[in-house]
Image (tube, grey):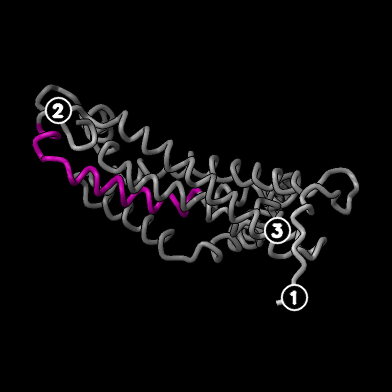
Amino acid sequence: MDYQWHWAIFGELSPDGVRPYWQTLADGLGWTLATALAGWVMALALGFAIGALRTLPSPLWRRLGTAYVELFRNIPLLVQMFLWYFVVPEVLPVTLGERVKAMPNAPFVTAVVCLGFFTSARVAVQVTAGIEALAGGQRLAALALGLDLRQTYRHVLLPLALRIIMPPLTSEFLNIIKNSSVALTIGLIELTASARALQEFSFQVFEAFAAATVIYVLLNLLVTAAMHRLERRLALPGTLGGR
């Protein structure tokens, strides 16, 4: 293969003549982190609520929670991204739809909402599994102490379930970082889109995507280490993680 490697490309100015290519990648990384973190906060809030809903005594609430999970978990992420960006503004009332389309950071907001709903369905499954993995006596003991059902979930079941599901939550956090790359399809210039722009302007395909790959790997390694540290801090003494 006759390919001219040019790693110095990252120090050269981009076509706008204002910033070097490495800064283009850095800006893309910033949007990736902002999108993933905002989506993760939304996914955790919705995921814990829906996951708890699926374990309530009421069959109606359990069915509603399950319907939510099946809806957002079984539609491909790319399809959901297009639906949120292109379809939802059109089916809203005209005035509201125009406001949504006129938002200054519409691709960013859309990506956060889409990733939040998509990932929350997956988090909800983990939360449900964590609650159901607890001994049934935990709920009964809390109720016997005088806590109502809401307090039982808030102070007993959800904190204990969180400790159980930390490893799968780490995987979901890594997934939302990687899934943020789908947002390039609606115009968000995150890390993958920045690498793509770099290769289109400079024709240095391998350098651009090699840099993006290294950044993704290093970022995910840092997240894994941080989540592992958090997992050990949250582990109960005397358990396998707490020692």
Q: Distance between the Cα atoms at labels 2 and 3?
A: 56 Å
| Residue located at (79% from left, 54% from top) | 9
Residue depth check, mark 1 versus mark 2: number of the one nearer the observer: 1
Q: Which residue is mark 1?
A: 2
Q: CA distance from mark 1 to mark 3?
A: 17 Å
Q: Amino acid at mark 2?
A: Ala
Direction top: furthest residue: 146
User: Which of the two labelled residues, at mark 1 and mark 3, occupies the earlier sequence position?
Assistant: 1
The mark tally for this picture is: 3
Magenta part, dominant SS: helix
Outermost right residue: 17
**Which residue is labeled 2 in the image?**
142
Question: Magenta region: which residues?
Answer: 116-140
Q: Measured from the top left, where is residue 141 in percent x and y?
A: 10, 29
* Vertical arrangement, residue 124 with respect to residue 209, above or below: above
Residue shown at 41%/65% (left/top)? Answer: 74
- Quarter holding residue 130: top left
Asked whether residue 136 is drawn in magenta, I would say yes
The nearer-to-camera label among 2 and 3 is 3
- Residue 178 percent coordinates (x, y): 53, 54
Secondary structure, mark 1, is loop
Which amino acid type is marked by label 3? Answer: Ala
Residue at x 54% of width, y 45% of height:
219
Q: Secondary structure at mark 3?
A: helix
Q: Residue at x 59, y 42 (%)?
A: 33
How crowded is the residue under tag 1: few (<14 C-alpha within 10 Å), some, or many (20+)? Answer: few
According to the picture, the residue beneath numbered tag 3 turns out to be 208
The CA span between labels 1 and 2 is: 70 Å
Give the class, few, some or many, for how many residues have Cα within 10 Å of label 3's Cα (few <14, many ≥20).
many
Numbered circle sitting on residue 220: none
* Marks 1 and 3 close (CB-CB < 8 Å): no
Which image quarter is the N terminus in?
bottom right
